[in-house]
Image: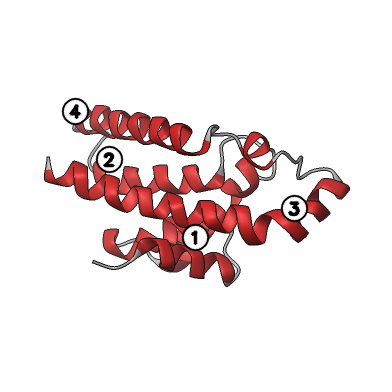
Amino acid sequence: MENKKEKAMGLFDNGCNCSQAVLLAFADEYGLDKEKAIALSVPFGGGMSKQGKTCGCLSGALMVIGLCFGKDSTTVIANRGNAYAMGKEFIERFQEEFGATDCRELIQLDLNKKNDLEQANKYVFGNRCKNMVGRTAEMLQLFLVEKQSD
């Protein structure tokens, strides 16, 4: 089994934001084209376009959960309910692991403030965010294995 933690961290190191790195680590398994995955997930970085809302790592993970469990969800309503349930459970696990789900709470900075953005660039993105990207991808990989074997 491919190590999604390492893959996501490598993607983050090579220019992806948090959301892109998590989604791209899984995209090929679900037939999602790399360029489309990059474009789709870019505005979710920084907590919804640098607004400090839902962490981009979590947003990327939820996109993967949709790819895995949300097929035909407009016609098979049970699939929609299943995807919601899987998303809710993963959000709860993320909250338990990191203590929050919002970017601003997780990094204690406002990315729209010049000083805070400079601080994030120097001290947060390269370590805290990179490690969260890796841990989120690792958690998601284990979650998907667990839920697909149920």
First along the sequence among labels 2 and 3 = 2
Question: Residue 25, how many percent across, how many down?
Answer: 40, 62
> Label 2 sits on what residue type?
Gly
- List the residue tagged with mark 3: 120
> Label 3 sits on what residue type?
Ala
Q: Nearer the viewer, mark 4 or mark 3?
A: 3
First along the sequence among labels 1 and 3 = 1
First along the sequence among labels 1 and 2 = 1
Question: Residue 56, how many percent across, how many down?
Answer: 55, 46
Q: Between marks 4 and 3, how big is the CA–CA gap? A: 41 Å
Q: Which of marks 1 and 3 is in front?
A: 3
**Mark 3 secondary-structure assignment:** helix
Q: Can residue 41 be seen in this view?
A: no
First along the sequence among labels 4 and 1 = 1
The residue nearer to you, when weighing 6 against 148, is 6
- List the residue tagged with mark 1: 21
Residue at horizontal 54 percent and vertical 34 percent from the top: 101
- List the residue tagged with mark 4: 78
> Label 4 sits on what residue type?
Ala
Residue sticking out furthest to the right: 115
> Label 1 sits on what residue type?
Ala
Q: Between marks 4 and 1, how big is the CA–CA gap? A: 29 Å
Residue at horizontal 37 percent and vertical 54 percent from the top: 138
**How many C-alpha atoms fall within 10 Å of the one at disc 2: few (<14), some, or many (≥20)?**
many
Q: Is residue 37 visible?
A: yes
Q: Between marks 2 and 4, how big is the CA–CA gap? A: 9 Å
The answer to whether residue 93 is above or below residue 126 is above
Q: Which of marks 4 and 1 is in front?
A: 1
**Mark 4 secondary-structure assignment:** helix
**Mark 1 secondary-structure assignment:** helix
- List the residue tagged with mark 2: 70
Numbered mark located on residue 86 in the image = none
